[in-house]
């Protein structure tokens, strides 16, 4: 289920699903550890023997943003419950203020907590605290405090127990067990008085290393949300900026997505840093993020790992170290970081050290150039194929061009030569540009599968645009533009990932659709651009969340949502259009 509201301040992260339930809770690092990882913080209401969970049937749920506040509204059974939520811009204080309208009288509001601190239930513990009354879940250096402030100002009911304790609320009474250890969960209830058709209550959630830290943060009270820095001209652009900031942790950790439901089909997730996504996101946000600070020193002078854990460790990978194609790297990630780092050296707090690191990676890229004048084979943008990829070559050319600032003519000469080689090796046939060339039985073979990444490479490298832009646009239009009800642009012909049926090129992706939109801008095709820029605006959720990809027929989001890269490419396209208008 997609996440419709997200909040992040660099160290804490909270996300809600389409029913308004909190499903992701990360601290002290955005992305990991995720103390919910898809489990739920439930909300329920009881009155005079009647009970209902707000996630259940009978409740209509709507969610949207008002400035940096996330609004959730549940309507059903004669009640309207409206939550206004925000995360403090600096401290781990997540504020939830509620207004309930309905028949006058007293109701009991329940909140249930099913955490796995550190992403495992081994050694978890919870207890009810007094003065102020709250429930703490804790383990090692993580404590999460749940507070309830209603009619009486304290917790009117509570209990701690093992898995499934939340069901105890359905009869309107909790067992008041004060403590539990192991695979624990907890729940409390607070009285709320509806008078004149309206009542108020709040349910703050606060993180810290210890209970004392949490209580100190609570004592100062309240949350001040992050103020967006850039002026944006569409609602989706404004929320895209909010999503990019929420999914970026302190120290340059740009997380691809935090949507744990993807683990239903694969016991892994997108809560990692792919340096490609990180660079393209940070670039869109003005180059202020210090991505070099995130890369561990042990990888200096080496090709970057496929992806990194949010805390900086090497992430899981499916690229082989032995046998065929034993080069477990995607060279474009290193090339993109070099280009980004050099262009933003003036913003670096450690200019000389960063310059030395970038020089090492630049020399590594120069050594990777083979006898054919192209980079050696590596894995592609989609992490599926081995070869010399058009996209990768384009990123290496840009790294060499930018690297001339550090290594002079050697880099510029390598860039110029590689542009010529690309034009002679990636020959256009039958309206298609090969997405890669790969070696088989000692021969270089072109792969003429139409691929949107080829167009992305042309956008990345202006020197390739005169020769390749027009045929690439025609190729994408002919082979990858979906003629289904959803429209949009597929990654490549026959894309299998999350495929729902045969008879179409592949699911439409936001990033691919935005690449074609930017290509139209370069060609001066304003009407075509305006048609495509509306596509993500038509497919985003009510709260303006963009998924990775969409169902070709129904337009429903597929895979993870929100995807950081989707929002970055939309925002980059909007800003590119603004630059052209100003020029």
Image (cartoon, grey):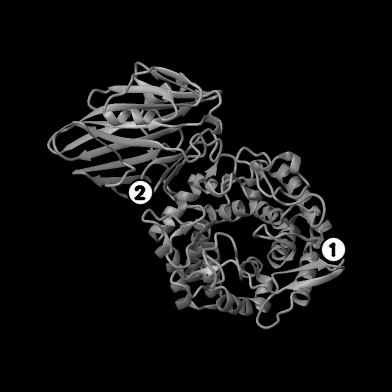
Categorize mark 1 by other alpha carbons within 10 Å: few (<14), some (14-19), many (20+).
Answer: few
Mark number for residue 459?
A: none
Please tell me which residue lies in front, 228 or 487.
Answer: 487
**Disc on the earlier residue, 2 or 1:** 2
Residue 295 versus residue 186: which sits nearer the camera?
A: 186
Mark 2 vs mark 1, foreground winner is 1
Q: Position of residue 301 (x, y in %)?
A: 78, 47
Separation (CA) of disc 2 from disc 1:
52 Å
Q: What element carries label 2?
A: loop
Helix or strand or loop: what does disc 1 sit on? loop
Q: How many labels does the image show?
A: 2
Label 2: how many Cα within 10 Å (few below 14, some 14–19, many 20+): some
Q: Where is residue 495 drawn, in percent x and y?
A: 60, 65
Hey, which quadrant is residue 308 in on the image?
top right
Rendered image quadrant of residue 395: bottom right
Residue highlighted by disc 2: 67
> In the figure, is residue 67 to the left or right of 444?
left
Q: Examine the rendered structure and indicate whether residue 145 appears above or below residue 266.
A: above
- The numbered mark at residue 370 is 1
Residue drawn 73% across the image and 63% down it: 401
Query: Does 204 sit above or below residue 238?
Result: above
* Residue 204 higher or lower than 287, as above or below: above
Q: Which residue lies furthest to the bottom in this view?
A: 430
Where is residue 580 shown, x and y percent of the image?
51, 70
- In the rendered image, residue 326, in percent from the top left (x then y), is placed at 80, 54
Residue visible at 55% across and 24% down? Answer: 141
């Amino acid at each position: 289920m997609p996440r419709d509201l997200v909040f992040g301040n660099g160290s804490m992260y909270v996300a809600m699903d389409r029913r308004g339930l909190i499903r992701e809770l990360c601290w002290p690092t955005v992305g990991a550890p995720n103390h919910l990882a898809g489990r739920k913080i439930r909300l329920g209401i009881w009155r005079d023997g009647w009970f209902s969970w707000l996630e259940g049937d009978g409740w209509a749920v709507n969610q949207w943003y008002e400035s940096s506040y996330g609004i959730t509204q549940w309507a059903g059974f004669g009640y309207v419950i409206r939550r206004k939520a925000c995360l403090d811009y600096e401290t781990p204080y997540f504020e939830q203020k509620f207004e309930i309208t309905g028949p006058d009288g007293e109701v009991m509001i329940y909140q249930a907590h099913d955490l796995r601190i550190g992403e495992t239930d081994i050694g978890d513990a919870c207890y009810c605290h007094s003065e102020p009354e709250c429930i703490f879940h804790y383990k090692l250096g993580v404590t999460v405090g749940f507070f309830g402030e209603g009619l009486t100002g304290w917790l009117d009911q509570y209990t701690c127990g093992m898995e499934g304790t939340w069901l105890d609320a359905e009869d309107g009474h909790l067992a008041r067990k004060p403590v539990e250890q192991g695979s624990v969960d907890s729940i409390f209830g607070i009285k709320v008085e509806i008078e004149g058709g309206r009542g108020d209550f709040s349910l703050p959630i606060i993180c810290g290393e210890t209970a004392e830290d949490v209580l100190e943060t609570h004592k100062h009270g309240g949350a001040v949300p992050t103020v967006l820095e850039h002026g944006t001209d569409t609602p989706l652009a404004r929320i895209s900026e909010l999503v990019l900031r929420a999914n970026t942790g302190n120290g340059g950790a740009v997380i691809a997505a935090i949507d744990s439901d993807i683990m239903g089909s694969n016991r892994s997730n997108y809560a990692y840093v792919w340096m490609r996504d990180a660079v393209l996101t940070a670039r869109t946000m003005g180059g202020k993020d210090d991505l070099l600070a995130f890369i561990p020193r042990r990888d200096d002078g080496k090709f970057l790992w496929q992806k990194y854990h949010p805390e900086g460790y090497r992430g899981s990978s499916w690229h082989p170290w032995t046998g065929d194609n034993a080069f477990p790297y995607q060279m474009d990630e290193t090339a993109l970081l070099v280009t980004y780092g050099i262009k933003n050296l003036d913003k670096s707090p450690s200019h000389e050290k960063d310059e030395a690191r970038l020089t090492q990676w630049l020399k590594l890229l120069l050594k990777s150039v083979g006898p054919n004048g192209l980079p050696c084979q590596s894995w592609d943008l989609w992490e599926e194929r081995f070869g010399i990829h058009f996209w990768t070559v384009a990123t290496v050319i840009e790294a060499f061009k930018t690297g001339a600032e550090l290594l002079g003519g050697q880099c510029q000469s390598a860039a110029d030569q590689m542009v010529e080689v690309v034009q002679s090796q990636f020959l256009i046939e039958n309206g298609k540009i090969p997405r890669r060339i790969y070696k088989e039985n000692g021969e270089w073979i072109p792969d003429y599968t139409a691929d949107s990444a080829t167009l992305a490479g042309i956008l990345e490298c202006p020197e390739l645009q005169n020769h390749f832009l027009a045929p690439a646009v025609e190729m994408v239009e002919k082979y990858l533009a979906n003629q289904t009800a959803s429209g949009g642009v597929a990654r490549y012909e026959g894309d299998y990932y999350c495929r729902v049926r045969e008879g179409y090129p592949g699911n439409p992706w936001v990033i691919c659709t935005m690449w074609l939109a930017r290509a139209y801008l370069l060609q001066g095709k304003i009407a075509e651009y305006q048609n495509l820029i509306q596509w993500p605006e038509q497919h985003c959720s009510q709260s303006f969340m963009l998924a990775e990809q969409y169902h070709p027929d129904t337009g429903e989001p597929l895979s993870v949502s929100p995807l950081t890269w989707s929002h970055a490419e939309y925002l980059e396209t909007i800003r590119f259009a603004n630059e052209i208008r100003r020029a």
